[in-house]
Image: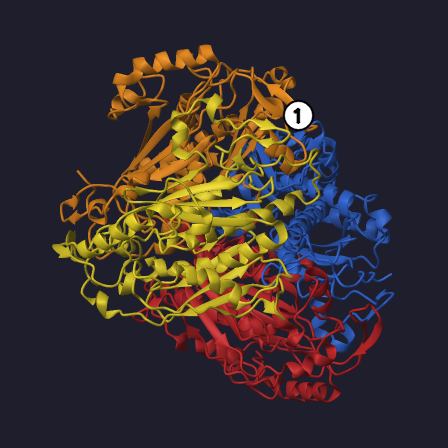
Chain colours: A orange, B yellow, C red, D blue
Amino acid sequence: MSGNTIGRLFTVTTFGESHGPALGAVVDGCPPGLALTEADLQRDLDRRRPGRSRYTTQRREPDRVEILSGVFEGVTTGTPIGLLIRNQDARSRDYERIRDRFRPGHADYTYTMKYGRRDWRGGGRASARETAMRVAAGAIARKYLAERLGVRIRGCVTQIGPVRAARVVWEAVEENEFFFGDPDQVARLRELIERLRREGDSVGARVEVVAEGVPPGLGEPVFDRLDADLAHALMGINAVKGVEIGAGFACVAQRGSEHRDEITPQGFLKNDAGGVLGGISSGQPIRAAIALKPTSSIRIPGRTVDARGEAVEVVTEGRHDPCVGIRAVPIAEAMVAIVLMDHWLRHRAQNGEVEPPLAPIPPQA
Amino acid sequence: MSGNTIGRLFTVTTFGESHGPALGAVVDGCPPGLALTEADLQRDLDRRRPGRSRYTTQRREPDRVEILSGVFEGVTTGTPIGLLIRNQDARSRDYERIRDRFRPGHADYTYTMKYGRRDWRGGGRASARETAMRVAAGAIARKYLAERLGVRIRGCVTQIGPVRAARVVWEAVEENEFFFGDPDQVARLRELIERLRREGDSVGARVEVVAEGVPPGLGEPVFDRLDADLAHALMGINAVKGVEIGAGFACVAQRGSEHRDEITPQGFLKNDAGGVLGGISSGQPIRAAIALKPTSSIRIPGRTVDARGEAVEVVTEGRHDPCVGIRAVPIAEAMVAIVLMDHWLRHRAQNGEVEPPLAPIPPQA
Amino acid sequence: MSGNTIGRLFTVTTFGESHGPALGAVVDGCPPGLALTEADLQRDLDRRRPGRSRYTTQRREPDRVEILSGVFEGVTTGTPIGLLIRNQDARSRDYERIRDRFRPGHADYTYTMKYGRRDWRGGGRASARETAMRVAAGAIARKYLAERLGVRIRGCVTQIGPVRAARVVWEAVEENEFFFGDPDQVARLRELIERLRREGDSVGARVEVVAEGVPPGLGEPVFDRLDADLAHALMGINAVKGVEIGAGFACVAQRGSEHRDEITPQGFLKNDAGGVLGGISSGQPIRAAIALKPTSSIRIPGRTVDARGEAVEVVTEGRHDPCVGIRAVPIAEAMVAIVLMDHWLRHRAQNGEVEPPLAPIPPQA
Amino acid sequence: MSGNTIGRLFTVTTFGESHGPALGAVVDGCPPGLALTEADLQRDLDRRRPGRSRYTTQRREPDRVEILSGVFEGVTTGTPIGLLIRNQDARSRDYERIRDRFRPGHADYTYTMKYGRRDWRGGGRASARETAMRVAAGAIARKYLAERLGVRIRGCVTQIGPVRAARVVWEAVEENEFFFGDPDQVARLRELIERLRREGDSVGARVEVVAEGVPPGLGEPVFDRLDADLAHALMGINAVKGVEIGAGFACVAQRGSEHRDEITPQGFLKNDAGGVLGGISSGQPIRAAIALKPTSSIRIPGRTVDARGEAVEVVTEGRHDPCVGIRAVPIAEAMVAIVLMDHWLRHRAQNGEVEPPLAPIPPQA
């Protein structure tokens, strides 16, 4: 278990480096009988794809995914699903200059100390390029959850640097190049990102994901609580430095009489819990938020050391996103889908015969 | 894997309910040769123990732990370490009144929906009482990490409701009954907690943990990054709603030129990364923070439904902490210790023969 | 994962040494709603118990098991079940003489090389005494399988040294002190075992287990096939040197036209497959056999070395079984129960919604 | 964990079906710094390859493996190694006639009952074709074990039907088309296999594997003993019905004074234990044997039912091995290599700092 597999029953194993021949994944544990084609995966891959807008990295990757196994006559068979994307636009020469210096804020130094060597081409395994496979795998989970359980998973950016969403208009999210929740801020964002690009700098972002229609009962106390597994999956996305469920850090200043979500036969009265109580889903929407750091791949020179430990200066040329958070929306959605799918199977395994003594309490209207 | 085990190589499995006969744990994977006695575990258990001060629950539990296996002639043998604490002061009658109603903000409803039944006595398995075993298990990890690697793990409360620590004075933390980092705020906290107690209400808290002396190289990309596993372990503590590493959510408003921690031969210049780059420890101190919600066990009546789905009112009598965050400090430290220990073993397994090409960069002075 | 846990969804973790204070286990993943008391576990424990007949070790252990958690109001709750047995009749002084010499055929030497030390009292963790917890845990699986799926698991000894069972009369198995399948051989066995006891020697045994009523569909290709997991569980019993499924090694000399079990609408025509095809249960009885070596704890002196690597002679005094295979019957049954239970949950997780296109083919009449 | 992954620290996940577009694997946990090229994998793949001799299936597959990740500048990086083999000579039309009937002795029926559907083309996932990836993955383990620990793993066939090897001449094994250990029997074998081919029948085989140079200390009591994990890996090979370690089933008739391997300072005196004591390697050669059933893919008509449950007759045309055991030699070697590699890493994780108190006892000369 070298960390390249996530999930216990619905497992996703990824492989591949930024500038290697290909990226791949094995999705194991998908129930049989799900209609599945490559087009089902391509939609989310296209949302994450680099070179999609002028506000993201200019690397051009078609990211066409091939299903190598596990699907027969258009339907999943219950055997492992192999996925493959060939890399096409890798320009390793951009990285030759930094092959023996450790970019601050990057994994260059830590990979070198851990493995004794590093693949310096475009970040190697540490590159966000690896997340393409998570998106492809997540699309399978997402399709199953939607078709069998009616779960809908949506995400958007709610803050970039100083610009915050005052509200979330879901219909507008896919309409703007930042996946931003609040359409009124898009003009300001364009200005901000253009300025950053000129200055060769970058900025952080906040991304929120909501999963509606999740049945009550998912989550395994005490360690593999649903929120704990979501935190694991979301903190495992490149550049993430914080995870919140429901009220998140705002709960520190709350009173107990204020935080608890009261219940009536007509439904929960609000959702500060973010859909999870005692680590188990309550039937309310799952609400999670993440903080993504500003990428350290910037053109502004920084101090660092080289492989001999000597002081040098580093500048990242290459092709980079001024705000990596923008492309994180489909990735975060995919990770939530994978975790929910896994917990659905785990729940069904142990509790397949349970008949709860009452009808589910409706979520907050 | 029903969620009661954490870790891959250093594994901790806990069992037991709040009002059952006993709590227990199995700690598997501890290397042989570590001197270990029950006294080594008792120190942290005593820090977490209920009834320790007037500001925490008045349940009286001596929490004397017994080592049942895995230690011979005062030294670990490499076989699993069985731990046991008998429950003594369980007053189940306090809970009879709420046995068929779902306290809002509690796991009562979700356990019922998941398992078709619930142990209503004192929260059953969902009770924070279970965390005693995490503290005992964590003490083993902590002792190993301190003796073999020189790792020091310390935690404190840095915010309770509106009261924030302006600074952290480590020497003062164990001196005050709130494990608060800033001794200047203790008087205000006493006042706050007394008021809450009178009002029958509760409040949230922020807890920070710092691990110093962690060698570079711990963490398994891409899913089991060190920060991802810390997030899993910390979000898995009862009442936690948010986890941050390093700068945490503050990074959303940062520029890349500001966030990245520059490096010189004399050491890193600061630590916004919180000691983790690309999911792997950098040798800088690991810095994590968590948000704990205000407990929902309060005396102020709340609206809910009962097991028949009908509207009722609920009041939690029992004996409860007005701020559960206070006792979370040793628990959070224990979880960090368990994760670090696990990753030390995982790292050693795959990379036991690695000789990094340069000496470690010193942490920020 | 230091090897003290078996199962993926129905997991059994054991701890404890032969002469330590206690043996224990955590059974995790048992579905909620199963009626369970200590008496349900005691029956199988009593069958395995030492000192039960004059043909097994004379160590006197009542082996009274205590359920510490996971059961409330007489029914499992879905939370982990903690089990405990206190050791009572440990006579460590019997072992002082061999504490620094490695008994040939024992784990003394290998534990020392692996862990750098060993618990020399009665075999420590390597003692068959640990298997008491497997029997207790297996009894839970067995009860669930019997009540919910109608599975019946039975085992018996079919060979001891030169004495082979010509047939298996299930009704007679529990009637004789050897759990032998063929009542006509019992007198010969008594003679054999008495002679061995006088000579201070021991003998091997063959044990067979049959599980009837197992539904088709259990087993996860390609690595965790049902037969592969049975082989893992059975080879993991102390002293086992071989495992067979169905025809076993006899298939080497068979033709394909002879080995394959033909099918008619009335049922399979025979069962050389032992109930497993392609690693998945077929609905026929699962048939497994194991070979248990003669214990090396004998009174006949043997050559070995001591902890300094010098040549010495060793004799095992203590109290030992002349044929450890006899007490292995309930252990083997328990391991089969644990594996089947685990695979039932695994199957339900992934295939909970599957409706096979035809009715199950009946097993061989 | 749907069963397509083996290993805990050195993990191999395979995907792909007999007649799908490709076979693949992810090998995770390989230490960094191992020189590795595709040629290193090809040698064993060629030994297993179909169409290699007139005594194996005539399907023509070049089985050229591509390394997609985890290797940079000719050396492993510590990141997952993706492997791919495109299928080329799949003739699905051979199988159309049996797509709705269940071949006796095959997985057709059990896959249908488990998954509700089956990939009928050439056995789908249940085909031995999947084992190509095991051989490729095993070659990585094998290279590491050979270069770093000096381990040598060799296998041969020792019985086919009635023909038994009287001895094993390792030099002769690769010289004959049956990987048979005893060159004196090869002429008889040719005759036997030719006769079977004419008759359209098949026969079973016994394969033995020996691993020399394995250091003492590998294996994790009590469930993941080295022998238990070998049994799991070997019983998981298609067509295997029995596994033996060391003396195997012969131990049933042995006395304790006969079975135990006595020890002298010059070394062990024999090796009935097969190199494993108490589940931990002793430093003696690991000796394992497996029984492979005669394939049920034969031309002699057999009785079965179809997907509607009605009685039909079935004949397997296609291209099949009269003795599948022949090609099992490299597969069995690969599985042994994978298990040893995994246990080497597991051992190093927990016991990396252990210094045994004495020098290893030499194996039997």
Residue at (74%, 32%) from the top-left corner? Answer: D39
Indicate the position of residue B180 as horizontal and vertical percent values.
38, 49
Q: Is residue B306 above or below residue D36?
A: below
Q: Is residue A135 above or below residue C187?
A: above
The amino acid type, in three-letter code, at marker 1 is: Asp
Lateral position of residue B183 relative to residue D6, left or right: left
Quarter where residue B250 is shown: top left
Task: Give how far across and how far down residue D136 sits, in percent.
Answer: 67, 38
User: Quadrant of residue C100 in the image?
Assistant: bottom right
Task: Read off the residue under disc 1.
Answer: A306
Q: Quadrant of the C terminus of chain B?
A: top right
Residue D85 relative to residue B320: left or right: right
How many numbered dots are placed on residues in this image? 1
Q: Secondary structure at mark 1?
A: loop
Q: Nearer the viewer, residue A3 or C355?
A: A3
Local crowd size for mark 1, using a 10 Å CA cut-off: few (<14), some (14–19), many (≥20): many
Is any atom of residue B210 visible in this view? Answer: yes
Compare residues A146 and A331 and report the one nearer the observer: A331
Rendered position, D315 above or below B4 = above
The residue nearer to you, when weighing A215 against D198, is A215
Q: Nearer the viewer, residue D52 or A158?
A: A158
Q: Position of residue D228 (x, y in %)?
A: 62, 59
> What quarter of the picture does the N terminus of chain B occupy?
bottom left
Q: Residue B253 at what x, y percent from top left?
A: 38, 25
Output the chain of dot 1: A
Which residue is rendered at x = 23% and y = 70% of the image?
B93
Residue D198 in view: no
